[in-house]
Image (spheres, grey):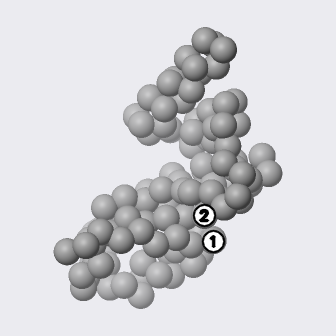
Amino acid sequence: MAVESITYKTYETCKKSLLKMGVCASELEELLEILEHEKSHFDKAVSLGYSPKYGLRMIADFPPIILAGYIDFDGRVPAGQDMIDILLAPKIPGEHDYIFAEKIRSELVQQ
C-alpha cells in the first residue's frame, strides 16, 4: 500500500480524474469540498504570477484512498507576503493555513 502523489494542472482535470478513479459518492463530495478550498489558494497564486498545480496524495488501490489534497508549484515558489496571501485566500482558511501564515509572518518580523 504505497502512498503516491499525483499532480494536475487544472481543477477540471483533477476533478475528472477523481470521477474516473471510482471514488465513492460520500468521499467524492468531501474531496470536491477540499478541491474548492484548494482552488482559492490556486487562483490567488495564479493572480500573483505563480504556476500552481493541484496534487492528491493517495493510496492507489481500487478504489483509491485519498489522503490529502494540496497545491504545489512549478518553477518559482511563493515566499513571504505572497505565501501569506495565498494561504489566507479561502473565505474560511483552514487551521493549517493560519498556522503556516503566522509562522511566515513571525519570520518576516524577525528579519
Q: Indicate whether 8 appears above or below 52.
A: below
Say few, some or many: other residues with alpha carbon within 10 Å of mark 1 (under 14 / 14 to 19 / 20 or more). some
Residue under numbered circle 1: 9
Residue under the image location 63 percent in, 71 percent down = 9
Farthest residue in the top direction? Answer: 110
Q: Indicate whether 70 appears above or below 101.
A: below
Q: Quadrant of the C terminus?
A: top right
* Disc 1 secondary structure class: loop
Q: Is residue 30 visible?
A: no
Q: Quadrant of the N terminus?
A: bottom left
Task: Using the image as rendered, state which of residue 3 and residue 64 is in the foreground.
Answer: 3
> Which quadrant of the structure image shows residue 43?
bottom right
* Disc 2 secondary structure class: strand
Task: Using the image as rendered, state which of residue 41 and residue 3 is in the foreground.
Answer: 3
Question: What's the distance in space between the residues labelled 1 and 2, CA to CA?
Answer: 5 Å
Q: Amino acid at mark 2?
A: Lys
For the residues labelled 1 and 2, say whether their Cβ atoms are less than 8 Å apart: yes
Q: Indicate whether 50 appears above or below 98.
A: below
State left or right for residue 38 relative to residue 66: right
Residue 65 in the image: state x and y as whole percent: 26, 71
Residue 105 in the image: state x and y as whole percent: 59, 21
Residue 70 in the image: state x and y as whole percent: 48, 56
Q: Indicate whether 110 appears above or below 93.
A: above
Residue under the image location 56 percent in, 72 percent down = 8
Residue under numbered circle 2: 53
Q: Amino acid at mark 1?
A: Lys
Residue 107 in the image: state x and y as whole percent: 58, 20
